Image (cartoon, rainbow, N blue to C red):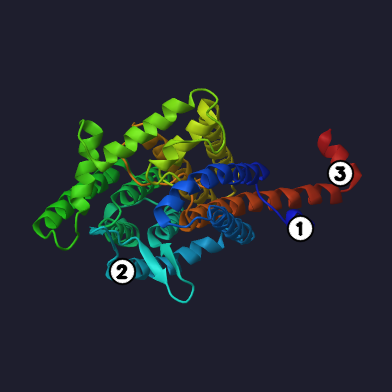
Amino acid sequence: MQQVFKNIKGDRLIWAIAALLAIFSFLPVYSAASNLVNIGGNSNTFSYFIKHFMHLFLGFSIMYGVHKVPYRYFRGLSMVMIPIVLVLLVVTILQGTTIEGANASRWIHIPFVNMSFQTSTLASVVLMVYVARYMSKVKNEEVSFKDSILPLWVPVFLVLILILPSNFSTTALMFLMVVVLVFLGGYPIRYLAVILGTGVLSLVLFILIAKAFPDAMPNRIDTWMSRIESFSDDGDTEADYQIEKAKIAIASGELTGVGPGKSTQKNFLPQSSSDFIFAIIIEEYGLIGGLFLMVLYMWLLFRIVIVAQKSDTIFGKLLALGVGIPIVFQAMINMAVAVELFPVTGQTLPLISSGGTSIWMTCLAIGIILSVSAKREEIKGKENEEEVEQNPLEILSEAI
């Protein structure tokens, strides 16, 4: 174990923030497990605790392994992974998973190990790395819209189109993050306006096709519309029920909360261990617990910006921002849904909510950020060694 800690590189504060979030997650996940027990019929709540521990253990193993890889290698890996991701997304759709009659083709079943994997989360990380690679490549060149269509926007829209039928919120989040990243990379604003317009038209066209052929995507469009309507109106829908229970949980928490494991709304709130875990956290730990989480995510964002600013290459800067900002943005959306500032989306709270795929891909993204910061530390260490190896007289003369 000491050898592992000795070999840890990169921003130590990012390691600390990730560890704090993971440690904090155990109590609310274990507390919300009672709801999972009622749904699944399993009387052993500790099994969910062990499952969450194993997800985090594997996630941090991924983080450790990835942060040891020089980040320049991710440039080439993104080119290889894009076609692989497209194939995985197609396979996921073809599996045709449905939940209660609704299209839920988000997971791909992995044979022999009896587990499922949500391919859209992997696609999100790979796509951001790919976009960072392209923008760093053309950073010092005059970009034309025509030349950027095939290498940049065709892969982006192919990935988004394959995710859209089963997961609108993830598609919208990915599209927004890609737009932010290309803007930060210096992509002309006039071209971005065209892309935004194309995105809106593509969504409208998709909705019209889905309405014309409802059997192709059962209930998805109706689900989207009901969530938006329940957010704007006082209807009686499942989304309203979730939000009402979440608000009751938040109101019950007050300043200091009712105490760890003492939540009552976890027994009534669907997805209490994942999508709405923030409401359970506030109920049990109060406003103080909620603010503590927000501070951790804002601190993580601050450290990501610092890592990007200190990177020695354009690719490193865009890479850290591209995979890092979506983590914090997703956390803010999850919190906003719980307090009814945003329609129900199904986005989890990174490193807090239960669920293996979300944890693993968040750890993958953090590992990439740590790889960028580790390279900066390596360069700084070599500079310090060169200074030490200088002749004392040379050092004195330079100081004078």
Nearer the observer, 38 or 235: 38
Cβ–Cβ below 8 Å for labels 1 and 3?
Answer: no
Element marked by disc 2: helix
Cβ–Cβ below 8 Å for labels 2 and 3?
Answer: no
Residue 318 visible? The answer is no
Please provide percent x and percent y for residue 89: 34, 66
Q: Which residue is mark 3?
A: 394
Cβ–Cβ below 8 Å for labels 2 and 1?
Answer: no
In primary-sequence order, the first of circles 2 and 1 is 1
Residue 90: mark in rendering: 2
Q: Is residue 295 above or below residue 1?
A: above
Q: Does 353 sit left or right of 384 as displayed?
A: left
Distance in Å between CA atoms under marks 1 and 3: 42 Å
Residue 191 visible? The answer is yes
Q: Quadrant of the N terminus?
A: bottom right
Nearer the observer, 36 or 22: 36
Q: Disc 1 vs disc 3: which is toward the camera?
A: 1
Q: Which residue is mark 1?
A: 1
Q: Which residue lies at the image location 49% right of the left edge and 66% below the top edge?
A: 77
Q: Does 180 sit left or right of 201 as displayed?
A: right
Residue 346: mark in rendering: none
Disc 1 marks which amino acid?
Met
Q: Does 42 sit left or right of 166 as displayed?
A: right
Q: Which residue lies at the image location 48% right of the left edge and 32% below the top edge?
A: 283
Distance in Å between CA atoms under marks 2 and 1: 41 Å
Nearer the observer, 379 or 9: 9
Q: Disc 2 vs disc 3: which is toward the camera?
A: 2
Q: Which residue lies at the image location 55% right of the left edge and 63% below the top edge?
A: 73
Distance in Å between CA atoms under marks 2 and 3: 63 Å
Residue found at the very far top of the displayed protein: 255
Please provide percent x and percent y for residue 366: 55, 51
